[in-house]
Image (cartoon, rainbow, N blue to C red):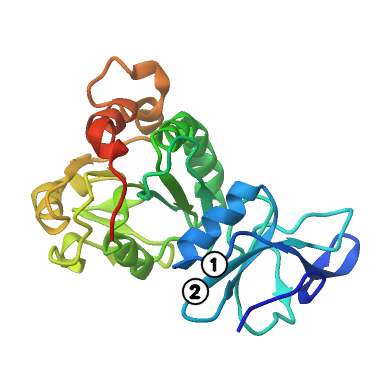
Amino acid sequence: MGNFKVGQQVGTWNSNGGQASITVKRELGSGYANRHEAAKAITKSGEQGIIAQGSNGQVRAYAVDDGSYLDDLDLGEKVSNKAPGVLEFIGDDATELSTGKKFYPPTGPDNGKVFHIFASYNTLTDKAVFGTADQFFLSDDISRLQKLGYTVVADFRPTKQEFQEAMYDPRTAGFLWGGHGGSGYVIDINDQYIGPQDLDANKVSPNLKLAVFQACQVGQERDTWTQNLNQPKVVAWDENVSNGAIQIFNSRSVRSSAHALDNLVDKYLGGDFAKAKFSP
């Protein structure tokens, strides 16, 4: 079990200053029901941390010292000698080292619900031309969701399985998929196709209200996506779409449009729905 003491070593990594030991600084809280809540506690603290398996099925969160004054533990770093019970390392950039997921905790009253951003850009060109720019234009939307009480989880290496797991999580209230698509499907980080037929509507989150696909031609299967996602508002393009058009769609400068992302968030994820706390 991962019940660690202050100063205990939980792993090592190769920093710019050489090999460094990762040690426990303090526990954050007193145990959580799942990894999601533990990750949220770490990102709220603003520190690097670990998620560990506790006793009685609980998950624990700890702030850690990465042991280096010249570098910071963050996405892309490799950790070795992981202590038994450690489930995940979270860097100072609030990103899980093994999954690439970045957590944005709520800044308003926490409603317990989640908005997912799936950024499926698997080449350096895609990441530079599309991913980085898209993240910039989404920054105000992320802030808006945080103020409404949502935790935003950005997945920079989304797989088909991770997408399905997110759709079947009852905390999921909305999502945005950015990447490549065609003829009604999207493509994950492993070049696997994902279509509406890959989802069971009976398992999809009853709280899912908004689904935005920012990929080419996904709208060709809009009705089937709507049915298999359990009837949320589905926004998708029927034809090819330029990245410039997507950035305009995400920009705060087009709030006058009923279809701008800001207004879709307010319409489908704001108001009483945002105020209502998630109850398992």
Check disc 1 and give the amino acid type.
Gly
Alpha-carbon neighbours of circle 2 within 10 Å: few (<14), some, or many (≥20)? some
**Residue identified by numbered label 2:** 58
Considering depth in this image, is 92 or 235 the residue closer to the camera?
92
Q: Is mark 2 on a helix, strand or loop?
A: loop
The image shows residue 162 at horizontal and vertical percentages of 38, 66
Residue drawn at the location 31% of the way across and 37% of the way down: 275
Q: How far apart are marks 2 and 1 (CA)?
A: 6 Å
Tell me the quarter of the picture where residue 144 sits: top left
Q: Nearer the viewer, residue 233 or 26?
A: 26
Q: Do the residues labelled 2 and 1 touch (CB within 8 Å)?
A: yes
Q: Is residue 47 above or below residue 242?
A: below
**Quarter holding residue 148:** top left
Residue corresponding to mark 1: 31
Question: Which kind of residue does numbered mark 2 sit on?
Answer: Gln
Percent across and percent down for residue 153 are 45, 51
Residue at (33, 67) in percent of width and height = 165
Instruction: Say whether residue 101 is visible.
Output: no
Is 212 or 94 nearer to us in this picture? 94
Q: In this view, does 209 lie above or below 203?
A: above
Residue 32 vertical placement versus 173 (above, below): below
Residue depicted at 44% across the width and 67% down the height: 33
